[in-house]
Image: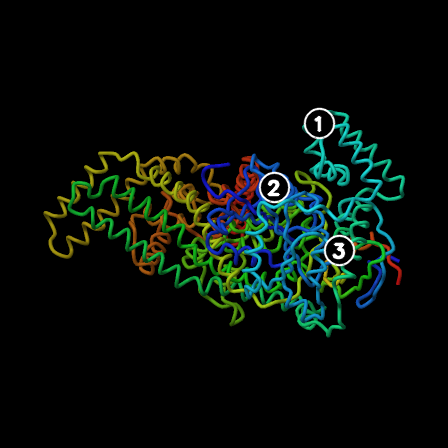
Amino acid sequence: MRLSDLGPGAIGTIVRLYGDGPLVQRLMELGAVAGTEVRVVRFAPLGDPMEIELHNYRLSIRRSEASAVEVAV
Amino acid sequence: MSVRGPVRRVAIIGNPNTGKSSIFNSLTGLSQRVGNYPGVTVEKKTGTLTPEIELIDLPGMYSLAAHSLDELLAARVLLGDHDGEPRPDLVVVIADATNLQRNLYLVTQVIEVGLPTILVLNMIDVAERAGISVNTRALSRLIGVPVIPTVAHRRLGVAELRAAILASVGTAAPAPRWEMPEAIRSELAKLEERFDRTGFLMARALIDEGGPAEALLARSLDGVFRSALADSRARIRESGMAPAALEAEARHRWIAGAVATTVRRRESRGRITDRIDNVLVHRFFGLPIFLIVMSAVFISIFMWAVPFMDLIGGGFDFLGESARRLFAGTSLQGGALESLIVDGAVAGVGGVLVFLPQIVILFFFIAILDDCGYMARAAFIMDRIFRSVGLSGMSFIPLLSSFACAVPGILATRTIGNTRERITTILIAPFMSCSARIPVYSLMIAAFIPARMIAGFLPVQGLVFVSMYFVGILAAIPVALLVRRTLLRGPRSTFLMELPPYKVPNPRSVFLRIVDRSRTFVRQAGTIIFAMSIIVWALGYFPRSPEVAATYDRMRSEAAGELSGATLDDRLASIDKEEAGAYVRGSALGRMGRAIEPLVRPLGWDWKIGMATIASFPAREVIVSTLNIIYDLGKETDERTGREALIGKLMSARWPDGGHVFTIPVAFSIMVFFALCCQCGATLAAIKRETNSWRWPAFTFLYMTVLAYLGAFATYRIGSAVLG
């Protein structure tokens, strides 16, 4: 399942990230590596981007970007 | 060692939102200076700790794996690889104590650079309230550098940090406790041996594929370097992971171990931030609240600034009059020097400073909203809209600022990481109706738009005023779309942005930010506007034909013969104004106006409007004072009677065939032209500075002028057809 498929409040554990461009590298630097728990906090009023929580902080990420993250619920 | 300036240099680095600026501010106070790194548009902020120690505030960043200009620059400053500056003697890394897992990522990278390092755990109070306690002594032992806990905004721990800096400057660098994964290390060793370059840059070149470190080394190393890098990466990839992923995972795994042994966490209650965001970013109310906040900011900028602007304007009028009085009775009275000082210099400086109240109020709001955390939410809310024109939520603040003045708006684009999006934002920023357009709009509206109501409550004048703002916004949308698809085509940027917890704004940071931005505005916009005001003054003053002087002197002596007392004074005053008008009409500027008349004729304009438009190049609002002089009104000091007199003149101005020059379509055509044009020397200079080339300001001026011309033409034609 992809991170972009989760709804508000859902919690998942990162399994892997697809691709190896700057987006994925930046995500990993920010702590989104395999084994990390992420929670979807909310979606922006216009439906995109989404707010996620990981390592006790909040990150805004577009749904298209979140689809690079495979999670297990 | 350089002779001037401090001997020791300390670099401050850290993630965004860690209170890095607060720490820097409390260490340096008002000794700080803001400049630019030569050749790049990254802000260089420095200050002094002691006369011997200089602090350098590096841009906020998450990783030294340089993705952006900011990050590359920070890495190069740390390496002593930038512009001949020596390596810093010490690095202070600021980390957010509530979030060590993410912050220690940069910390471990900085330690690898090989400089003495101090780790600051800021916001230790917030961490404690959230149930997080850090064993700083254990952490210090584990990562091998001194650890200082601080609460920067209350200045707690700042004295200890100061002492630690003084104690650590000049000591040996710590040995990194973390090592790259074996697969990377062995490839790195091969590359280092083959190309005779060791250390950090080579590691970044290997790991960050297509990144700036690779480009930098490739420039100085021979052609096989890139293929050697590719081979090394391919061998690392055989382990199943790309080099960057391998590094990030291994580093985070090590950090997770360090955090597990040094940080204790108690169950914490629901966060205040969540409760605030449940309202401010609410699915239905989020957008309306956002619109209300922004309108409130907007309206207060204009309402609060007016008395101060009047005060400054009045002050400069008084200064000009005083200067004139000094000349009165001397042999220089009415001469070029008097005019240069009064109409050129004083008016030029006044024309800059009159915008200062708006800039100060704008940055007051931006600093508060940013410091408390709402600006990140604004970008979060707006991202969807900006994405549809090829930008991101990061463009929101620059464009909002541009409604006060495009110059600080263009400066604010530095936070946009993606260069193409940044330049696109710069190109459309001048479309946001800035405060210099208001005098143009309000003159035309007061003169030609009836003060009536539609449906009993909607004032027509107000609607026209607001619609001018929409003209600019509506033009910006297709331009951004087009530019992102042609000139600046490229991959969409990412929108990974931290949403920091809300906090009470720190008055000290807010104050310093306002001072800093205002200083930048006065220095950068000020010098340009001032210089151009002098040039335009000279164009409007010279050449002075002796025939004009003779004609009006004759009129003066005739008047003196026929009249006396108050009537004579009135007559002489009006002769003075007519003479000033005659001089301007015969000046270089007047000739330029006549020369371009065929060009502006299709817009419904006469040569006087054309000339006033040329004269308004330093700053748009100058058109009003130029129209005053052209229409023989001289320099009216009283604003209200001055404007009424000008409106009267405009309404009675006629073509040689007897028709009115100014009609409603002409008024609209002038307003639309000014809404869309880039008649602003300061904006063009800011674009030049921020893009490091004359190409972009030239392009901006040309395309906006063409668009303004077409817009004004269409407005005039359609207006004439509709109104018969």
Are there few (<14), some (14-19), or many (20+) residues within 10 Å of tag 3? many
Q: Give the image location of residue A65, x and y in percent.
A: 78, 52
Question: Between tags 1 and 3, which lies in front?
Answer: 1
Residues at marks 2 and 3 on the same chain: no
Q: Give the image location of residue B45, x and y in percent.
A: 53, 48
Circle 1 chain: B
Whole-number angstrom distance, CA of label 2 to CA of label 3? 32 Å
Whole-number angstrom distance, CA of label 2 to CA of label 1? 21 Å
Residue B545 seen anywhere in this rendered image of the structure: yes
Query: In the rendered image of this protein, does residue B65 appear above or below residue A11?
Result: above
* Residue behind mark 1: B221
Question: Between tags 2 and 3, which lies in front?
Answer: 2
Residue B78 appears left or right of B558: right
* Residue behind mark 2: B77
Taking the view exactly as shown, the residue that stands out farthest to the bottom is B269
* Residue behind mark 3: A62
Q: Residue at 79% of width from left, 34% of height from top?
A: B189
Query: In the rendered image of this protein, does residue B332 appear above or below residue A38?
Result: above
Q: Residue at 32% of width from left, 36% of height from top?
A: B587
Asked which colour scheme the image uses, the reply is: rainbow
Q: What number is the disc on residue B706?
A: none
Circle 3 chain: A
The amino acid type of the residue labelled 3 equals: Arg
Q: Secondary structure at mark 2?
A: helix
The amino acid type of the residue labelled 2 equals: Val
